[in-house]
Image (cartoon, rainbow, N blue to C red):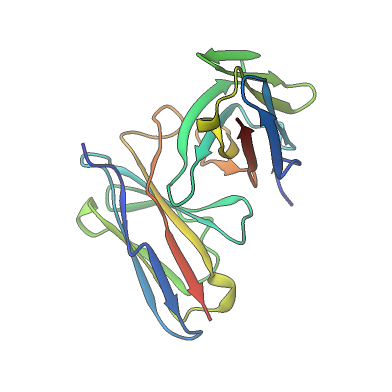
Amino acid sequence: DQQVKQNSPSLSVQEGRISILNCDYTNSMFDYFLWYKKYPAEGPTFLISISSIKDKNEDGRFTVFLNKSAKHLSLHIVPSQPGDSAVYFCAASWYGQNFVFGPGTRLSVLP
Amino acid sequence: EAGVTQFPSHSVIEKGQTVTLRCDPISGHDNLYWYRRVMGKEIKFLLHFVKESKQDESGMPNNRFLAERTGGTYSTLKVQPAELEDSGVYFCASSLGPSPSYEQYFGPGTRLTVT
């Protein structure tokens, strides 16, 4: 049973618009969440994270929102750029335990 | 600074054969992790080394998988004998300290195809 879900396998967005990637989790023990970005033939690279004591974390064009009551987090990319086209993985951990990843969402930013 | 490297990048073997994957972490990173992504699904944790010791191997699927990290530097993951369901991309990651306080840096992965 998947503890971290990304229900949209793919998403297409026009360049300059907002990309919203969603992630849902089932384990209420999770207290730290991360987003990784992966290009083809490369390993995932860390993008942004959020602790469960916060509900928002921002880094440049990337913002992660956490709704603990809904067990939901989202990654907003504004404005989207063609170079953002990649697979985005949501990951979660608790009490310093190892990461649990979602299946990924493939984002395509169209010029 | 060199990143995490993995060898080979791709391996095709027949069912029943043995394959050994290698991971060289970033120099100085005591923490080394192995993950696997099967058929475009989620990336699953396999195990975690701290130096040469196995900190957590709860994700290892069965005893056909053997991971070692002699000397606390590079690590190998051996699959013996390989089965069809072992096909996937095996990622290695390393970090200076324990996650999530320290970022995990991933290698490019080894794509294993078992036929």
Residue B82 picture location, percent across and down: 48, 78
Report the side of B3 relative to A1 (left or right).
left
Q: Quadrant of residue A68?
A: top right
Q: Quadrant of residue A17?
A: top right
Residue B67 picture location, percent across and down: 37, 63
Residue A2 appears in the rendering:
yes
> Is B15 above or below relative to B35?
below
- Which quadrant would the C terminus of chain A be assigned to in this image? top right
**Residue name at image x 50 percent, y 13 percent:** A60
How many numbered circles does the render carry? 0
Pick out the residue farthest to the right: A70
**Residue name at image x 52 percent, y 36 percent:** A37
Report the side of B22 relative to B59 (left or right).
left
Report the side of B53 relative to A40 (left or right).
left
Residue toward you, B40 or B68: B40
**Residue name at image x 46 percent, y 32 percent:** A46
Residue toward you, B89 or A85: A85
> Is B7 above or below relative to A71?
below
Residue A69 picture location, percent across and down: 78, 21
Residue B53 picture location, percent across and down: 32, 52
Q: Quadrant of residue A72?
A: top right
Residue A54 appears in the rendering:
no
Residue toward you, B84 or B97: B84
